Image (cartoon, helix red, strand yellow):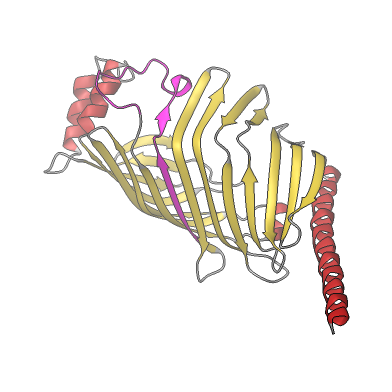
């Protein structure tokens, strides 16, 4: 009986090890196929090494020195390392880890570097051949974007959560950023009065986005799903005693042109106005006229109440033209 139990245990170990090897091999094969497909499209797609790990309960793949170059834009991305891991029973419940090493982006002659304490993400895919995205949760700490001219923006914490709604092409998206501040490359000569804080606390975005199709495995192989309806349930930011909230809904056509309204309310807008005048962002000779105009747009409580309209490819605030509307296209 004891000998039989030992044989059974050995058999189970061999079968389990074989299953683990086949599962990790499948991940490697899909990765190699994806890289080969990108190269066939003209991309430069290189990975220095791919290592298996996680035995016996997880399928873990460790990639090092990832380099991607887009043939059309010549934009490139360099990732020092990436770890993908999932339970052996279902690879669609995956975790992604990036170490605290800089990511380097280049486009034309510009270079941007993302410094951080690393990032973690959890991805849940719907079972089936399409592998639709069900949920995504990602977080990072101490982020800073650096350009040649200096720091562009930094954040203490960033949390992003995406969940598929009942309609498979619709996703609920929540973003929270704390300690967000703009660096010299963004603010330039902006002068802050003494005592004003360095950062926004916090910035919150709650939105519902409907795409032309669900996010699934095809999104990594061809064109990306494109937004067709964006509903901003809440967008809120606070800086010192100034607070801003926004909400609205916009449809997006096949060319990425939005149509709709965005309603914005700004509390204690005078503080930001004085900051812009002090830094000459608003020329002093224009300040009295601009201030009277903003006061006329304020409600009885003194909060600035604005509606920005996107129509026929143009943005307007009331009767004031603001210029062309941005194209909302995911490349």
Given residues 276 and 53, the one toward you in this image is 53
Q: Position of residue 122 (x, y in %)?
A: 58, 55
Q: Position of residue 326 (x, y in %)?
A: 49, 40
As drawn, is 259 to the left or to the right of 102? Answer: left
Residue 16 visible in the current orientation = yes
Give the answer, above or below, for where 283 lies relative to 53: above
Q: Is residue 143 magenta?
A: no
Residue 72 falls in image quadrant: top right
Residue 221 visible in the current orientation = no
Residue sitting at 19 percent across and 40 percent down? 303
Residue sitting at 54 percent across and 17 percent down? 149
Q: Is residue 181 magenta?
A: yes
Residue 78 falls in image quadrant: top right
Q: Position of residue 305 (x, y in %)?
A: 23, 43
Most extreme residue toward the bottom is 1
Q: Position of residue 63 (x, y in %)?
A: 75, 43
Quadrant the C terminus occupies: top right
Residue sitting at 22 percent across and 28 percent down? 271
Most extreme residue toward the left is 300
Given residues 38 and 71, the one toward you in this image is 38
Quadrant the N terminus occupies: bottom right
* Total numbered labels: 0
Highlighted range, magenta: 171-198
Give the answer, above or below, for where 271 lies relative to 211: above
As drawn, is 43 to the left or to the right of 212? Answer: right
């Amino acid at each position: 009986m004891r000998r039989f139990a030992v044989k059974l245990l050995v058999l189970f170990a061999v079968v389990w090890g074989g299953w683990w090897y086949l599962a990790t091999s499948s991940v490697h094969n899909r990765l190699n196929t994806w890289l080969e497909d990108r190269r066939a499209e003209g991309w430069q797609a290189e990975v220095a090494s791919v290592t298996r790990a996680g035995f016996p309960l997880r399928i873990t793949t460790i990639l090092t020195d990832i380099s991607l170059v887009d043939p059309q834009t010549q934009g490139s991305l360099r990732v020092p390392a990436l770890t993908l891991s999932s339970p052996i029973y279902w690879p669609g419940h995956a975790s992604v880890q990036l170490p605290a090493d800089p990511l380097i982006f280049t486009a034309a002659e510009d270079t941007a570097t993302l410094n951080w304490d690393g990032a973690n993400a959890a991805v849940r895919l719907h079972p089936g051949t399409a592998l639709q995205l069900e949920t995504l949760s990602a977080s990072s700490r101490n982020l800073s974007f650096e350009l040649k001219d200096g720091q562009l923006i930094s954040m203490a914490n960033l949390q992003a959560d995406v969940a598929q709604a009942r309609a498979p092409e619709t996703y609920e998206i929540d973003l929270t950023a704390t300690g967000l501040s703009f660096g010299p490359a963004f603010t330039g000569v902006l002068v802050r009065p003494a005592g004003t804080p360095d950062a926004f606390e916090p910035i919150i975005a709650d939105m519902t986005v409907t795409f032309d199709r669900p996010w699934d495995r095809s999104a990594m192989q061809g064109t990306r799903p494109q937004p067709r309806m964006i509903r901003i349930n809440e967008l809120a930011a606070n800086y010192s005693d100034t607070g801003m909230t926004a909400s609205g809904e916009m449809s997006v056509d096949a060319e990425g042109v939005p149509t709709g309204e965005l309603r914005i309310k700004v509390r204690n807008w005078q503080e930001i106005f004085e900051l812009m005048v002090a830094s000459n962002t608003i020329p002093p000779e224009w300040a009295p006229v601009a201030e009277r105009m903003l006061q006329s747009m304020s409600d009885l409580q003194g909060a600035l109440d604005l509606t920005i309209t996107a129509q026929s490819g143009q943005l307007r605030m009331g009767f004031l033209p603001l210029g062309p509307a941005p194209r909302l296209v995911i490349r």
